[in-house]
Each structure stands twice: as structure tokens, then as C-alpha cells.
Amino acid sequence: MTPDAPDDPRVVPFDDETTQVLLLRRWVSRILRAGALASGILLLAGIVAHALSAGPALLIPPARLDPDQVAQAFERPSAAGVVLVAVLVLALTPLTRVILSAGIFARSRDRPMLAITAFVLAMLALTILGGVAF
């Protein structure tokens, strides 16, 4: 008998709260690991690329991050652009986690947790928009 068989006692229906928590923990863990790993690899690649080039100082941040700078990092790759993308991946990892959590709560029809997660998502969105606008 495979673990996916409907009559397997180890398989718990999705609407069970324990299953929801386990699924959420598993995916949140995967997202956090993947985001940290991807960011670390990109950061290391950017630092190595900078060490091999004679470009401007890598770690002097601009006074304000312009969305055009982000677009340029994707259009014309450079050491500083790779580092910028690494930081963006690291910063967007928690946002991805909250979006996934909202999806899981919506799927399981857990309205109180969905409302809390939607509120957190709205606060993150306002913070990002506020950071870009000001």
C-alpha cells in the first residue's frame, strides 16, 4: 500500500488542522531555505565578479534605491547588479512566505487566519510602497 492511498491511516484529510500546520511549516521552511540559498549564491557571485573586475566600489549604497536601478540590474548584469538582486531575493523571501500562507489558509477555509495573513500582507505592501515612494 502506498502512503497516498485513500485508505492509508497515515494520510490525514487536508481540512484537518494538523495537516494544515504541517503543510504550512514544510512550505515555509522550503521557501526560507530556497530564498536564503539563492540570495547567498547570488551575493557570492556578485562579490566574486566584483573582485575580478575593476568596477566602482561595490558596497557604497545609493542614497535612494530607484526602481530604474533594479531594472538596470536585470538588463545589464554587473557585479553590483547581482548583489542588488541578491538583496532583493532575500528581502522578498518573507513576502513570498506570507503569500503562500494566505493561499494555504484560503484553501483550508480558515477565515480567521486568512484575515490575519491578509492584514500582514497589506502591511508589507504598504511598507514596500512607502519605501519606494518616499
Image (cartoon, rainbow, N blue to C red):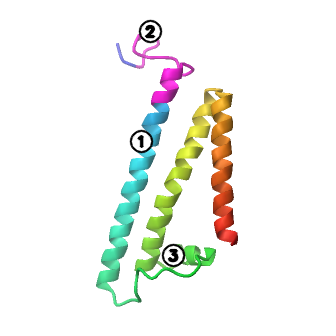
Q: Nearer the viewer, residue 128 or 2?
A: 128
Q: Amino acid at mark 1?
A: Ser
Q: Which residue is mark 3?
A: 73
Label 1 and label 2: CA atoms lie apart by 29 Å
Q: Position of residue 131 (x, y in %)?
A: 64, 67
Q: Position of residue 17 (x, y in %)?
A: 53, 21
Question: Which quadrant is home to the C terminus?
Answer: bottom right
Q: Is residue 89 left or right of residue 98?
A: left
Residue 7: numbered disc: 2
In what element is the residue under mark 1? helix
Q: Amino acid at mark 2?
A: Asp
Tell me the crowding category of disc 2: few under 14, some 14 to 19, or many 20 or more residues within 10 angstroms, Cα based: few
Q: What residue span does the magenta drawing correspond to?
A: 4-22
Q: Amino acid at mark 3?
A: Ala
Q: Can the viewer see residue 78? A: no
Please, what is the dominant secondary structure of the magenta stretch? loop
Tell me the crowding category of disc 1: few under 14, some 14 to 19, or many 20 or more residues within 10 angstroms, Cα based: few
Q: Measuring 42% from the left and 72% from the top, which residue is drawn there?
A: 83
Residue 18: numbered disc: none
Q: Nearer the viewer, mark 3 or mark 2?
A: 3
Q: Position of residue 66 (x, y in %)?
A: 61, 77
Report the number of numbered marks. Answer: 3
Q: Measuring 41% from the left and 80% from the top, which residue is drawn there?
A: 59
Q: Quadrant of residue 80?
A: bottom left
Q: Which residue is mark 1?
A: 29
Question: Which quadrant is home to the N terminus?
Answer: top left
